[in-house]
Image (cartoon, rainbow, N blue to C red):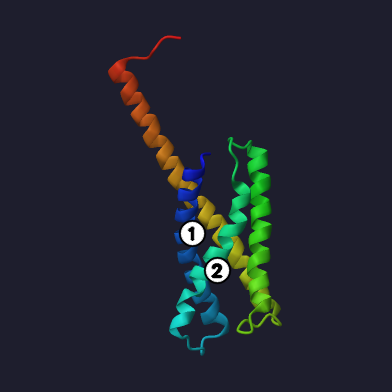
Amino acid sequence: MEWKRFLVNKLILFFMLSTLITAAVSLIGAAFGGDEHLGYGDFLTPVKYAALCMLPTLVTYARRELSPRALLLRKALMLVLLEGVMLFIAFTSPAIDTNSSAVVLTIAGSVLVIFVLANLFMWIKDSAEAKRMNRDLERFQRTYGETEA
């Protein structure tokens, strides 16, 4: 994959992660700290988390297309790194009660759910793009005829 396309995909992923993390923080906060009040600076927390979560996604970059096995291995490594980043944030934040195993498991579970959803959404986007390209190719071939090899 070319670097420019890789970066565009990461930008799309960043905004997708910001949205999903906002939803997760809202749900977890309502479940475990419903009486807390947030300041305006706290609204940037999901954006900061999404930015930090972009770093582990760099392990998926390759100049050539990866084999399915290599892609799965890199995605698994990325998930482990994402879990590590978010749990590190949780354990170093005084605002998160990491003494509660329920909180830690909920954070880890939400990272997994967000990972699956983000990959599903990216697959849907890529699939739609591939279908569009195939339709365009078929239209081109009908218009100009197939070239013989």
Give the alpha-carbon distance from disc 1 to disc 2, as whole Å. 10 Å
Residue 23, x across and y down, in percent: 48, 70
Look at the picture and state if 58 lies above or below 68.
Answer: below
Residue 46 at x, y = what percent?
50, 71
Give the residue displayed 37% in from the left and 36% down from the top.
Answer: 132
Identify the residue position indicated by label 2 in the image: 49
The location of residue 29, given as percent across then percent down, is: 53, 80
31, 64: nearer the viewer: 64
Q: Residue furthest top?
A: 148
Instruction: Kindly indicate the quadrant of the structure image that contains residue 70.
Output: top right
- Comes first in the chain, label 1 or label 2: 1
Crowd around label 1: few <14 · some 14–19 · many ≥20 (10 Å): many
46 to the left or right of 133 = right
- Does residue 89 appear to the left or right of 149 in the view shown? right
Is any part of residue 33 visible from this angle?
yes
**In this rendering, is residue 112 above or below 99?**
above
Pointer 1 residue = 14
Farthest front residue?
Answer: 3
Q: How many numbered discs, if any? A: 2
In the orientation shown, which residue stands out farthest toward the left?
143
**Residue 102 visible, this orientation:** no
Q: Residues within 10 Å of mark 2 (few under 14, many from 20)?
A: some
The amino acid marked with disc number 1 is Phe
At label 2, the amino acid type is Tyr
Locate residue 144 relative to residue 31 in the image: left or right.
left
In the image, residue 90 sits, relative to residue 39, either above or below, namely above
Residue at 70% from the left image edge and 77% from the top image edge? 101
| Residue 40 locus on image (x, y percent) | 43, 83
Residue visible at 53% across and 52% down? 119
